[in-house]
Image (cartoon, rainbow, N blue to C red):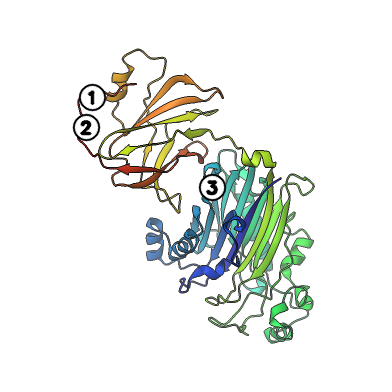
Amino acid sequence: MGDLTFYTVTYNVATRSPRQPLEDLLQWNGRTEHQLPDFCLFGLQEIKAQPQNLILDSLFDDPWTAALRDVLSGYSYVKIRTVKMVGLLLNVFCKRKHVPLLKEMETSETRTGLLGLWGNKGAVSFSFKIYGATICCVNCHFAAHEEYLKHRIKDYHTIIESQNFGLSKKTILNHDYVFWFGDLNFRLDNKKFKSAKEIVSQVNNINSSIRNATTLAEIWTQDELSSVMQKSKAFKGFFEYLPMFPPTYRYIFDSSSYDLKRRPAWTDRILYKTIDPSNEKCLLEVLSYKYIESIQLSDHRPVYSEASVQICSEENFNNVDQPVIFQPINTWQLETENEINLQIKNYIPWVNDWIGVFKEKYTSLDDYLSYVYLPLETIEREESNDENIQFDNMASLCRVKFLPEECSDGSKRVCLKFSETLVLNPGSYRLIYFSSINNSVLGVSNPFIATKQTRELNTSHEFGW
C-alpha cells in the first residue's frame, strides 16, 4: 500500500517572535531526503495580533510563517496554505513532488472567544484531497483557566458544528483522516494534587530523560482531556498516542523550570481520527509523540508528532492521472508572445481557471510572479477557416484554442497563447494550472528558461497553425 507521512507541530508562542532559528522544530535527526515526511503541519497559538501586525500580515508572510519557510526551503518543501485568525496560525507544507496532486483545497475558521466575536480562541482548519484521500487539519486554542472545563468542551462542539468546506459542505468529521492539534488547555483534576509545587515535585523526582505519561502515571491519571474522551463528552472517535513528555505548561520564559503560579498540565496536544477505524483502507499509525525541550521561547513547550497514513494501493500511488498535462516548453522568448500546448482529460476548462507563473524552485503556492485567467472567449475547433485571424485578434492576456487532434487516451489538445507581459525577466520558471471550481492544482509544467531574443523577429510574420 502507498503511505504518506505527516509531521505535526503545535506551539503556543505567547506573542513572542521567532528569535532563534527554527531548525529545532524539525526533529528529523539527519534523515535522508527519502525519509523526510511528505507533509508538515504547524499550528501556532497566541502569535502577536496587534492591529499593525494584522495589516502587515495580510500583505506579507508573518514572522513565524517566514521563519518556517526559510528553514523548510532547504528541504524542498512548498507552503501550500496559510490560515490565520487573530492569534491562531496554521501553516501546511508538502514536498514539491506532491503539489500537482493537491485537490479540493478549502479553509474554515471558528471564533469562540468573547461569545464568538473575537478570534483569540477558536480554530482554523484546512481541508484537501490527495491520492483520493480527504485530509482535514485543525489548529485550535480552547478556553483557558482551570475552572473553564465546560467551556473547553463547548468550544470543541462549536467548532465541529460550525465548520464545513467547499460546495459539498464537507464537515470536519467527514474526512478520511483528521489531524486535530493546538493548545487545548485541558488541565489536571485537582482532587489529588492541590498545588503546582506538588506536581512539580512529582515531575522532578523522575529522571528528565524518561519523563512521560507512563513514568508520571499519578499525574497523568488526573488529565482532564483523557477523562473527557473516555466519557465521550468531546472528541468522540479521536485517539491520542501516549505523550512521551512531561506537562508542557507552564514554564518560566527562557527557562527549563516550571512557573509555580500555575499548576503544570499537558495543555498542548495532537489527536487523530480516521473516518472508519475498522476499514483497512483507512489506517493511521503514530510513529512518535514528544516535546521539544530545547525551544524555551514561550511559557509552553512545542509538541510534535509524526504519523503514517495509508492512502491507496501502490499501483495507484505511483500512477495518478492528471487532468492537465503541460507539453514540454522548450523555449520562452521574452518581449514577445509565446504559445504552449496542454492535454486535458476528463475536465472542461472554466472561465475563472488560472495559470500562475512561478520560479522553478518556488517555496509557496502564494508566490506566483504573474497569472492569467482563462478568457471568456475561446476558439472552438469546429469554427470556420478564419479562426486563425480571430485567435490573433482576441483582446486577452491569454488566448485559448481547442485543437482538432484527440490523443489515444481520449484527452484533448489545447493551445494557449500568452501575452509578452506574462514573464518579464530572464530565469527558470514553471507554470501551474489551478481550477476555479474546486480549488485544485490540475497540472504543473516542466521547468523552462525564459531568455531575451537574440535577433530581431519579423513582426510581419503571421502566427499560423
Question: Which amino acid is tagged 3?
Answer: Lys
Describe residue 63's horizontal placement relative to residue 288 as left or right. Answer: left
Residue receiving disc 2: 457
User: How far across and down, in percent of the image, does residue 12 sit?
Assistant: 56, 69
Foreground residue among 328 and 13: 328
User: How far across and down, in percent of the image, does residue 240 sit?
Assistant: 72, 62
Q: Secondary structure at mark 3?
A: helix
User: How far across and down, in percent of the image, does residue 149 sit?
Assistant: 68, 68
Q: Secondary structure at mark 1?
A: loop
Is there a contact, CB below 8 Å, between mark 1 and mark 3?
no
Instruction: Report the disc number at residue 97.
Output: 3
Relative to 312, say whether 248 is above or below.
below
User: How far across and down, in percent of the image, does residue 238 sit?
Assistant: 72, 56
Mark 3 and mark 2: Cα distance apart in space: 37 Å
Q: Residue furthest front?
A: 454
Question: Which amino acid is tagged 1?
Answer: His
Foreground residue among 173 and 217: 217
Residue receiving disc 1: 461
Q: Residue at x 60, y 44 (%)?
A: 130
> Residue 216 lies in what quarter of the image?
bottom right
Q: Earlier in the sequence, mark 1 or mark 3?
A: 3
Describe residue 44's horizontal placement relative to residue 245 as left or right. Answer: left
Instruction: Report the disc number at residue 385.
Output: none
> Residue 261 lies in what quarter of the image?
bottom right
Relative to 34, say whether 330 is above or below.
above
Is there a contact, CB below 8 Å, between mark 1 and mark 2?
yes
Q: Residue at x 49, y 27 (%)?
A: 348
Foreground residue among 333 and 238: 333
- Within 10 angstroms of label 1, few (less than 14), some, or many (20 or more) residues? few
Mark 1 and mark 2: Cα distance apart in space: 8 Å
| Quadrant the N terminus occupies | top right
Is there a contact, CB below 8 Å, between mark 3 and mark 2?
no
